[in-house]
Structures are given as C-alpha cells and as structure tokens.
Amino acid sequence: MTGTLQSVPLDRLIPFRAADGGQYREADRDLDELVASIRESGLKEPLTARNHPTRAGYYEVISGHRRLLACAKVGLREVPVVVNDVTDDEAEVAVMLGNAARLDAAP
C-alpha cells in the first residue's frame, strides 16, 4: 500500500470498524511509555488510514490505533497520516496483519 502523507486533525480520525471490539477497547492499556515517547520526540511513524467509506471528510484508521490514543493523551491536534485508497477487504487484511504482528494481540 502506498498513499499520500497528510496532516489530519485527530477529530477526523475514526477507528476501523472491525477494531471497535476488544482489540480497540484494550488498546489504551499501558500507553504510558508511548505517551512519554511522543511527548519527548513527537510521533515518529505516521498512522495509516483510508477515506471513511460513509463519512465525507473523515478517515478510518487502518493501523496506529495505539498511536492515535497516545497522541490524544499528549494533546496533539493533528497527526501525520498516510492515506491509502483501499477496499473494505484490503483494509480488513491490513488490520489483521497489523494485529498479528503485535505480541499481545488477542485472536
């Protein structure tokens, strides 16, 4: 996936609809280290998202849900986001692959 890098307001970012289950609810656990890192050095890796399929002007986060939560705790108003043009199926696969890479991800 290659996309365009944009600066997006936090209030325009919505978690991927498949991430609103336990994975996303648990994403705010143990954010202290990530929050401290972002406070000290800024966000080092952009989030990835796609244009929201039903809400014009909004973006659906594909990867970076924990970074999104940490940025909100830091008080950032905008974050760098790579916006990709992907289908529902491609977005679901990307979310699953991202979760599979995390050691603490639930099945």
Image (tube, rainbow, N blue to C red):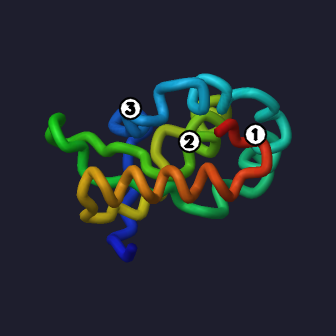
| Residue at the (34%, 60%) spot, across then down | 90
Report the quarter where the N terminus lies.
bottom left
Q: How many marks?
A: 3
Q: Nearer the viewer, mark 3 or mark 2?
A: 2
Q: What element does badge 2 sit on? A: helix
Which class describes the residues within 10 Å of circle 1: few (<14), some (14-19), or many (20+)? many
Image coords of residue 5 (percent x, y): 39, 68
Q: Residue farthest to the front?
A: 107
**Which residue is labeled 2 in the image?**
65
66 or 79, which is in the foreground?
66
Q: Residues within 10 Å of mark 2 (few under 14, many from 20)?
A: many
**Which residue was labeled with disc 3?**
11
Which label's residue is closer to the chain start, 3 or 2? 3
**Mark 3 is on which residue type?**
Asp
Mark on residue 99?
Answer: none
Marking on residue 35: 1
Tell me the quarter of the image containing the C terminus: top right
